[in-house]
Image: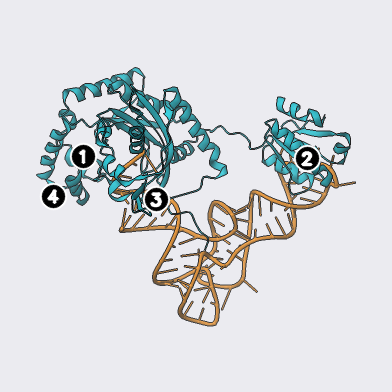
Amino acid sequence: MQIQSPKGTRDILPSDIQTWQWVEKVARSVFETYGYQEIRTPIFESTELFVRGVGDTTDIVEKEMYTFDDKANRSITLRPEGTAPVVRAILQNRLLEGTNVLKLYYNGRMYRYERPQKGRFREHWQVGVEAFGAAGAAVDAEVITLAHHFYTTLGFKDLMLHLNTIGDRACRPNYVAELKAFTKSRLDQFCNECQGRYERNPLRLFDCKRGCREILNEGPRLVDYLCEPCRHHFDSVKRYLELSQIDYTENPDLVRGMDYYSRTTFEFTAGGLGAQNAIGGGGRYDYLVEELGNKPTPGIGFGLGVDRIILALEAQEVAIPTQPPVAVFIAVLGDEAMLVAFQLAQRLRLGGIRTELEHTGRSLKAQMKTANKLDARYVVILGEDEIRDETATVRDMETGDQQSIAFDQLAEKLRTH
RNA sequence: GUGGGUGUAGCUCAGGCGGUAGAGCGCUUGACUGUGGAUCAAGUGGUCGUGGGUUCAAAUCCCAUCACCCACCCCA
């Protein structure tokens, strides 16, 4: 039996790599434009970080983590998300000390033990940003603007922004209590799963894709329970977005999967992805730093799924800038020519020209075919005549023109093209 | 964890009423003794996912198993 990659993992092949590199390049470039610096954290962490950070009643922690004991019986978990590790890192390295606002971005693989489907993998790539130290609504809007900037730079056509607020410590408990009371009186009308949600995390009732959501239309609305500061914060975020001319839909159902969120939550969805259509999301987490043992520090961030973004770009047929793998192909005829070709190739490469040469000694016709398939702009032909005259025959594959160029001028001539 | 679908050549897929395995693309070679993209021709290529059963005979029927895909759950 052939050994296969583990379920839910996959190889990113050379034929796809330019798309990946492009998405990563755009992310870096946009994030740095907004003043973010990269941070890299370990791919595994102490299990406790996620239990405390993400929340022990969340699905991620309850059933989706890759957790194991190391040889010294420490409980280790492959990171399922990026925010908690970043918070751990800034606390451990005292990055908040002496800093006003700290802006970081990351790019890495995340691990969740879930049943794979379209746009969902056990190993997936996320890029994200985190901003610490600013409590004002302008930062919320800035992060959302950054995300929007990123998606539109990539060329997304079919993009939607969903926006919500989930209140804070002052007002959310009141609302949750009302919601529970409302739900309890008609619990028998809810599906089995929602009855479980009622126990564990009532806000998740809004996630139900069956009929239960209907029942809640009659129930209490979070917007009616927001405290004054939360209401004002939300209004400000919306005003900033309107100033930036970013369209959004208020979506009161948007409750995110981690316990650490407060106030603003948002999510971007894209067409062409099937059921898993969220290509990024985030929110404010003003209590997370405190939860992980430091003095209270406001924070907000968002993460985007690279795998899904690439699927959506393909579905939306967005053109991706690519370059041919080689610029110059050296066609070689005979063993003598090979000795010369090897040296010439090295000279071109030292000159920064992407160069490939024939390694299997086929007919010139076959070599031309290969050069064509590689989309090389030039073919340098080396046979007996060329060796004798120390002059290469250079063919422009676009125009079909051919000329003779002395060996010692080759690098310079080809570079200027 | 639950449901449905699919596994045949490197890739995309036919064949399915049991009777020695097919196409297109790719790759190699040739038509064109040192010149690509087009055309034509020849060649290359498969323990028909795996194991078992029925049968004179199984890619085809039956059972089991594995893998992948899609959906639920949840999320990126």
The residue under label 2 is A341
Mark 1 belongs to chain:
A
* Left-right relation of A205 to A365: left
Residue type at mark 1: give it. Answer: Leu
Q: Mark 4 or mark 2, which is nearer the start of the sequence?
A: 4
Horizontally, residue A285 falls left or right of residue A200, namely right
Q: Earlier in the sequence, mark 1 or mark 3?
A: 3
Chain under numbered label 4: A
Q: Name the residue tied to disc 4.
A: A188
- The residue where tag 3 is placed is A116
Chain identifier of the residue bearing label 2 in the image: A
Q: Are marks 2 and 4 on the same chain?
A: yes
| Alpha carbons under labels 4 and 3: distance apart | 32 Å
Structural distance between the alpha carbons of marks 2 and 3: 49 Å
Q: Tell me if label 1 and label 3 are in contact, CB under 8 Å.
A: no
**Chain for disc number 3:** A
Q: Are marks 2 and 3 in contact (CB under 8 Å)?
A: no
Of helix, strand and loop, which one carries label 2?
helix
| Residue A129 picture location, percent across and down | 38, 31
Question: Chain B appears in which tint?
Answer: orange
Amino acid type of the residue that numbered disc 4 sits on in the rendered structure: Asp
Mark 1 vs mark 3, CA separation in Å: 26 Å
Residue located beneath label 1 in the image: A203
Separation (CA) of disc 2 from disc 4: 80 Å
Write down the quadrant of residue A298 in the picture: top left
Q: Residues within 10 Å of mark 2 (few under 14, many from 20)?
A: many
Q: Which sits earlier in the primary sequence, circle 2 or circle 3?
A: 3
